[in-house]
Amino acid sequence: MIDIEPLRFAWTRGGADTLALGRLHLAAGQTVFLHGPSGCGKSTLLGLLAGVLSPQQGRVSLLGQDWAALKPGQRDRFRADHVGVIFQQFNLLPYLSVLDNVTLPCRFSALRHGRCQNAGGTEASAQKWLQRMGLSAELWTRRADALSVGQQQRVAAARALMGQPELILADEPTSALDAALRHDFMDVLLQAARDAGSTLVCVSHDEQQAARFDVQWSLPAMQQVGAHA
């Protein structure tokens, strides 16, 4: 699913490396818990995995496709087809309804739209993932900005799962939830990713969740010695 050849990434030309990683491999369907102190490069690594950032040295490939070999428009289409993202700030469109936010990936990706059609239709797929996230039907027609922060986070998760993308990247997906709800939400997210057949890479400071994932990546340790998964 994911192949990283030894890479280096710095935010400024000639500046200190933000990331310096050895060779990494991640199989399809695996779940990864990515942790480390603030500022160590976790979100930067997610950006590299999503093809939003490009390393100065090395290579990042998804499904055998080197991100750097794609032109910008091709990269955007490939990302829309194969990557679902749960952003730390959600990035919902506030003026759209919950359902319209969740179905957005199918507007940008014919591949994910087709998968939803094969599963009973785009709206039916959106309703399924919203139900899985514990959001009742009375909320589906509300504007996204009318929901609580925790509810918006669940909408963002449902959107990422639409059309069964091969890779889901989650940046602190439980940060807006009370401690009592984090475990239940992670249960739902992990099972939903497995049901969708998606690889999940999850950044989190909540290390109590780590043992529930197939693989744990400690970014500081990876930068010191490289890693294999």
Image (spheres, helix red, strand yellow):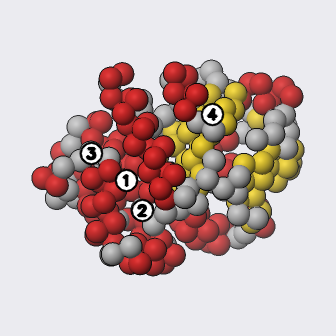
**Residue highlighted by disc 1:** 158
What residue is shown with label 4?
Answer: 34
- Mark found first going from the N terminus, 4 or 1: 4
The crowding category of the residue bearing disc 4, from other C-alpha atoms within 10 Å (few below 14, some 14 to 19, many at least 20), is: many
Residue 162 is tagged as 2
Residue under pointer 3 = 134
101 or 126: which is nearer to us?
A: 126
The Cα atoms of the two marked residues, 2 and 1, are separated by 7 Å
**The residue under label 2 is which amino acid type?**
Met
- Which quadrant: the C terminus? top right
Q: Is residue 4 above or below residue 79?
A: above
Circle 4: residue type = Leu
Task: Indicate the secondary structure of the residue bearing disc 3.
Answer: loop
Q: Residues within 10 Å of mark 3 (few under 14, many from 20)?
A: some
Q: Report the Cα–Cα distance between label 2 and label 4.
A: 23 Å
Q: Which of the two marks, 1 or 3, is nearer to us in this view? A: 3
Which numbered disc flags the more N-terminal residue, 2 or 4? 4
